[in-house]
Image (cartoon, rainbow, N blue to C red):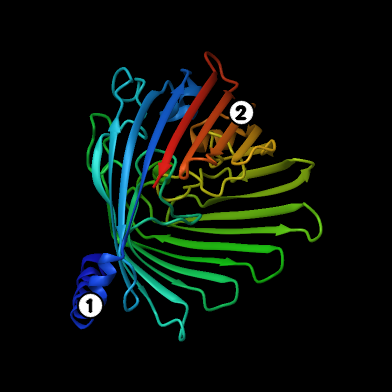
């Protein structure tokens, strides 16, 4: 496949030509550009579990970490259909944890001191009288069910990619994504604990995304992703099935019943491997309003054959139906959850309480290497956007897990976030 550096060169030459032709416009574009930024603070605290419970808890076991990240972005004003953007980020570990590595208080998702280029892209918008199409080339953030950068922790990952977006069809967004490299939030700094480095894909990832709202009350979202690489794609759970290329598919339907508060949804995901067992899962949800409260009941069921590879990026499962710390992608895992949400009449406040129960058969346990059968999680999610200080937001996630294992099998997990956007 064509590598990204060749595409960068071609677009760079075109951009230089455009600059020479429209020097005055380019100068104005630079002068009228905008600076934005964000300060992100995350604290993660959790108790320690052992045995099979530790395998489920993973990197979040026995955490006592915190860090701050600063991201600053500059984007030019548009000229002749072009825009340029660049963003830098720096993360600073608070160094409040004891030890480094697997059996310590460290959580490498949080405790990173690193500086890197988060974004560096060129945007081009075609003539709107001809087509509602735009092109973004370079290092960028991507949000989609099967490919996404993470926003849960201080530093963000990104992708070197070409993304073509088209909105010519009524109430429809189409995206074609061509990804050359995954830039991990760590950069290439190991910080003593992280051994991962950026993933430069030998064969580019290709994905097609659709979002449609043309039928009243119905949202249709679909995506197909081809990962034609035989080496590990990156972070768990994606590399749970490393060493084999695969294709993943996503279809999600969400329907708001007219003249009611009822919303129902379903999703189906598939993962087809070249030589390993294929897998996938499906889920359903239903929610309604009862006074000031929104109540949602959801169920997901993962195939026994293998764990689902998840969302590629530092996001285990973006379109999850259960707002819990424990994810829903392990082989044979069946998750039933009940969620109650309310703003409690306070502007800017959102509160959510979720209770999730898991079951898993022997085949699923064997193929996932996990035992979630009989376990459960009670999760509290509090979010608040300041009404007096623009850009200030906080979130507190508090979960109590019962893994139903021998030994120490109850875990309490707290993640507190304080962010300021400017």
Report the disc number at residue 24.
1
Which callout, 1 or 2, points to the residue nearer the camera? 1
Q: Assign a secondary structure to mark 2.
A: strand
68 relative position to 246: left or right? left
268 relative position to 149: left or right? right
Q: Residue furthest top?
A: 407
Question: Can you give x and y, in whole percent of width and height, for residue 2 in the image?
Answer: 26, 70
Question: Please, is residue 353 above or below residue 7 in the view?
Answer: above
Q: Residue furthest right?
A: 259
The residue labelled by disc 2 is: 377
Question: Please, is residue 390 above or below residue 178 in the view?
Answer: above
State the quadrant of the N terminus. Answer: bottom left
Q: Residue placed at 39% from the left, 34% from the top?
A: 41
Judge whether residue 412 can be spotted in this image.
yes
Q: Nearer the viewer, residue 104 or 290?
A: 290
270 relative position to 79: left or right? right
């Amino acid at each position: 496949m064509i590598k990204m550096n060749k595409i960068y060169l071609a677009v760079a030459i075109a951009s230089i030509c455009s600059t020479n032709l429209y020097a005055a416009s380019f100068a104005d574009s630079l002068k009228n550009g905008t600076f934005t930024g964000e300060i992100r603070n995350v604290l993660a605290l959790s108790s320690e579990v052992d045995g099979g419970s530790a395998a489920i808890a993973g990197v979040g076991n026995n955490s006592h970490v915190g860090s701050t990240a600063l991201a600053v972005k500059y984007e030019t004003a548009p000229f002749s259909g072009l825009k340029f953007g660049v963003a830098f980020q720096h993360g600073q570990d608070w160094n409040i944890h004891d030890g480094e590595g697997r059996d310590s208080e460290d959580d490498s998702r949080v405790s990173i001191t690193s500086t890197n280029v988060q974004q560096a892209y060129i945007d081009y918008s075609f003539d709107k009288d001809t087509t509602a199409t735009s092109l973004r080339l370079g290092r960028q953030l991507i949000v989609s069910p099967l490919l996404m950068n993470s926003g849960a922790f201080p530093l963000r990952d990104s992708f070197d990619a070409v993304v073509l977006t088209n909105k010519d069809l009524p109430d429809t967004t189409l995206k074609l994504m061509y990804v050359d490299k995954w830039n991990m939030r760590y950069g290439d700094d190991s910080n003593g604990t992280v051994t991962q480095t950026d993933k430069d894909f030998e064969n580019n990832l290709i994905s097609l995304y659709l979002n449609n709202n043309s039928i009243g009350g119905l949202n249709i979202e679909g995506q197909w992703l081809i990962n034609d690489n035989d080496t590990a794609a990156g972070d768990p759970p994606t590399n749970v099935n490393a060493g084999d290329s695969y294709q993943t598919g996503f279809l999600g339907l969400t329907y708001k019943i007219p003249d009611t508060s009822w919303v129902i949804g379903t999703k189906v995901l598939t993962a087809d491997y070249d030589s390993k067992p294929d897998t996938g899962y499906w889920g359903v949800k239903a929610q309604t309003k009862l006074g000031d409260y929104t109540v949602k009941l959801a169920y997901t069921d993962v195939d026994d054959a293998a764990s689902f590879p998840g969302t590629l990026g530092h996001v285990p499962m973006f379109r999850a139906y259960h707002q819990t710390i424990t994810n829903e992608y392990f082989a044979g895992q069946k998750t039933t959850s009940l969620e109650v949400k309310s703003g409690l009449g306070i502007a800017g406040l959102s509160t959510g309480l979720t209770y999730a129960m898991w079951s898993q058969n022997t085949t699923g346990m064997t193929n996932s290497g996990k035992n979630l059968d009989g376990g459960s999680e009670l999760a509290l999610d509090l979010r608040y956007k300041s009404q007096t200080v623009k850009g200030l937001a906080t979130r507190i996630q508090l979960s109590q897990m019962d893994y139903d294992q021998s030994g120490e099998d109850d875990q309490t997990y707290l993640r507190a976030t304080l962010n300021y956007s400017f």
